[in-house]
Image: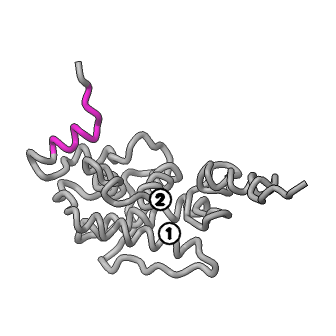
Amino acid sequence: MTTLSKWTKLHCMRKEKNTLSEEDTLKGLAGEETTDADRLRRLVDYVREDFRIADEEGRFRAFLHGLAPHVRKTDYLKEQDAAALHREFGEMFRGLVADPPQRYPLPTAYGFLRRQKPGATIRFSGEGRTVDNIRWGVVNLLLSAGENLLACKECGEPFVRERRQVFCSERCSQRVRDRRRGKGKPLKNR
């Protein structure tokens, strides 16, 4: 018996209706993440990938919809809009970790504060286009977990750290260790 992944099921649903249901949107469709830091980490990983790979089976677009769960029964994000957001967020993350950091303008759509239920976290929200609501969702992620967004000490790419992490990948970490040990230097003649 073949089990379909969540993304494959979502892709089939989209082909039939070309929209995300309210239930799927409210679930977040951002994977199994439990914290804003996890969601921010996944978003940064997506924008570091090539768009065609990141959006395979609509994964990136479904993830973006999950960042704005207050959007109900919205039309599914078009591929060109998702590609533009992919570029925009990549530039934004690189700008925020640059030295000196660059400013990022907030979405121009009407914004307001919103609370899903009493006692819940207050978040920025917006009315208008889906793209602007997704931008507000990213602003919320940055406000709650942005202190973990750093530039890799080796390659300078943005990443979201876990604990004391200072490199974006094992590859960058290994490069630094190799240099420290002198493996990167040619051997001297004896």
| Residue at the outermost right position | 190
* Above or below for 6 versus 147: above
Q: Position of residue 23 (x, y in %)?
A: 24, 43
From which residue to which does the magenta span run? 3-13
Q: Label 2 crowding class (10 Å Cα cut-off): few <14, some 14-19, many 20+?
A: many
Label 1 close to label 2 by CB (< 8 Å): yes
- Kind of residue indicated by mark 2: Val
Q: Quadrant of residue 91?
A: bottom left
Q: Residue at x 30, y 77 (%)?
A: 109
| Residue at the outermost front position | 190
Q: Secondary structure at mark 2?
A: helix
Asked whether residue 110 appears in the rendered view, the answer is: yes
- Kind of residue indicated by mark 1: Phe
Q: Position of residue 8 (x, y in %)?
A: 24, 39
Sequence-first disc among 1 and 2: 2
Residue 11 located within the stretch drawn in magenta:
yes
* Above or below for 171 versus 131: above
Q: Main secondary structure of the magenta part?
A: helix
Q: Position of residue 48 (x, y in %)?
A: 45, 60
Q: Residue at x 39, y 62 (%)?
A: 137
Q: Quadrant of residue 50?
A: bottom left
What residue did someone put label 2 on? Answer: 44
| Residue at the outermost top position | 1
Q: Secondary structure at mark 1?
A: helix
Which of the two residues, 148 or 106, is positioned nearer the viewer here?
148
Asked whether residue 69 appears in the rendered view, the answer is: no
What residue did someone put label 1 on? Answer: 93
Q: Position of residue 166 (x, y in %)?
A: 68, 57
Residue 130 located within the stretch drawn in magenta:
no
Left or right, 135 with respect to 75, comes to right
Q: Residue at x 52, y 76 (%)?
A: 95
Q: Quadrant of residue 60?
A: bottom left
